[in-house]
Image (cartoon, rainbow, N blue to C red):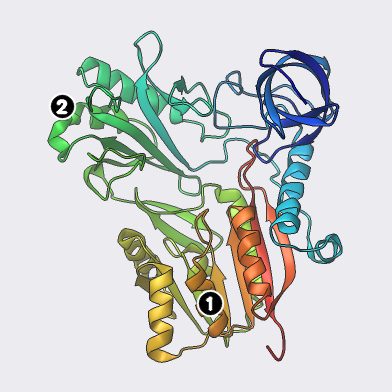
Amino acid sequence: MNFQKNERLTVSIDDMGIGGEGIGKKDGYPFFIKDTIAGDVAEIQVTKAGKSYGYARLLRLVKASPYRCDPLCRVSRACGGCQLQEMTYDRQLFFKEQKVRGNLMRIGGFSAETLDAVTEPILSMENPIHFRNKVQYPVGYDRDGRLCAGFYAGRTHTIVASDSCIVHPAGTDEILRKILCYMEEHHIRAYDGGREGKHGLVRHILIRYAESSGEWMVCLVINGSSAGALRDADALVASLAEIPGMTSISVNFNTKDTNVIMGQTGKLLWGRPTITDTIGDLQFEISPLSFYQVNSVQVKKLYGKALAYAALTGRETVWDLYCGIGTLSLFLAGKAASVCGVEIVPQAVEDARINAKQNHITNAEFLTGAAEKVLVDRYRETGEKADVIVVDPPRKGCEESVLDTMVRMEPERIVYVSCDSATLARDLKYLCGAGYRLAKVCPCDMFPYTVHVETVVLMSRVEGK
């Protein structure tokens, strides 16, 4: 098809892309159209047309989808944080189930019949607002040169100022207001990483909230190497300490020209270095650098499903790879003979050991290092076997060396917790070619209003392999 830029068309939106954009076809040629959803009929304007597909922007809705609803946030279209706010929650869940299913079929090579037999309904959230326990706000300036903190607009570095975000914990607005007032009163500039040089001090504001204890943590990420770079930090501490539940105030040092938010070192300004949260019967100490699931409500369902898939009887040796601060490891330890957790972030490993001690768990050990190195080295040195292996890797999935060593350790069951169903599908295909079968699949909605979805999978060893 020979469509031209800026050409106006009317299309029916019949499908959804993995990024949450609607897909409409004109004479068989597909366009990806932001701000549309399946069921819409839309007038669009072509922005780019390639050989196989194109992109367009929404001009107006000719007919609204039955799955469309009013967004809860007034800046939802401008902000890059949520992609599905104009879709009813039930339809969001359907979209996420189909996203997982589509990747498992297209990338993993699993048949529809297989997935029909093993897939369980998505674990939904009863009240899907204010669910995040961790927020990282970039700090900068709006178009009028005013200091602001908020979220990046989609595919840009333009900050959309925070305005009572529906997914962040209630109370963050007051914290942000106090920090920005402090910066203005003391003439502290936001970091500017533009081409003309790296200027300014405050890069990000990290806020964590522990719902079970009501404790708050604030950490300013600064373009400096000492807390002295913050003028009159005592004034900031005094202002934030007035907030009920404020427990920890610190700075983190990041002077590198990088998109990585947090540096590896910091300094406590006031209070405790950690806050305490509870999942089930277990308490966890969380530091600024800790990896901790951001949805404290849904993580109970996620870990409950992983524990059910592990089917522990008290006799098993379990390895938990990419274990963070040991949250899932300690859940497993209550049902296993022994658990060994592996994590690359040293502070997280230290937190995991503290969490084990504080919860009086003695059958869990934690090793520092990359999973692909620790697991491989341990197996080569000892030939140790595992009854169950649990993995919860980053978005890139598992290194092939990890998958290969997992197979060599011959666990009866592998429980794979994934935040990216595309790399999950790739890794499951490898495991299925190495003596394992897909036994259970369960998506979990950890991030309502976004396109992201967690998935828990059970892989069972095939006898004789």
Instruction: Kindly indicate whether the residue at mark 2 contacts the one at mark 1 (C-beta within 8 angstroms).
Output: no
Image location of residue 422, percent across then percent down: 63, 54
Quadrant for residue 13, please give it: top right
In this view of the protein, which residue sits in the foreground, 358 or 42?
Answer: 42
Image location of residue 324, percent across then percent down: 43, 61
Quadrant for residue 235, please give it: top left
Residue picked out by circle 2:
232
Say whether disc 1 or disc 2 marks the residue closer to the N-terminus: 2
In the rendered view, tell whether residue 372 sits above or below residue 388. Answer: above
Marks 1 and 2, how far apart at CA:
54 Å
In this view of the protein, which residue sits in the foreground, 336 or 391?
Answer: 391
Residue 438 horizontal side relative to residue 64, left or right: left
Residue 422 horizontal side relative to residue 194, left or right: right
Image disc number at residue 101: none
Image location of residue 330, percent across then percent down: 49, 70
Does residue 216 appear anywhere in the picture?
yes
Residue picked out by circle 1:
404
Q: Which of labels 1 and 2 is toward the front? A: 1
Q: Amino acid at mark 1?
A: Asp
In this view of the protein, which residue sits in the foreground, 374 or 155?
Answer: 155
Quadrant for residue 232, please give it: top left
In the rendered view, tell whether residue 365 sits above or below residue 248. Answer: below
All told, the count of numbered labels is: 2
In this view of the protein, which residue sits in the foreground, 449 or 284?
Answer: 449
Q: Residues within 10 Å of mark 2 (few under 14, many from 20)?
A: few
Question: At x 63% / y 58%, what residue is drawn?
Answer: 302
Element under disc 1: helix
In the rendered view, tell whether residue 118 sits above or below residue 254. Answer: below
Does residue 122 appear anywhere in the picture?
no
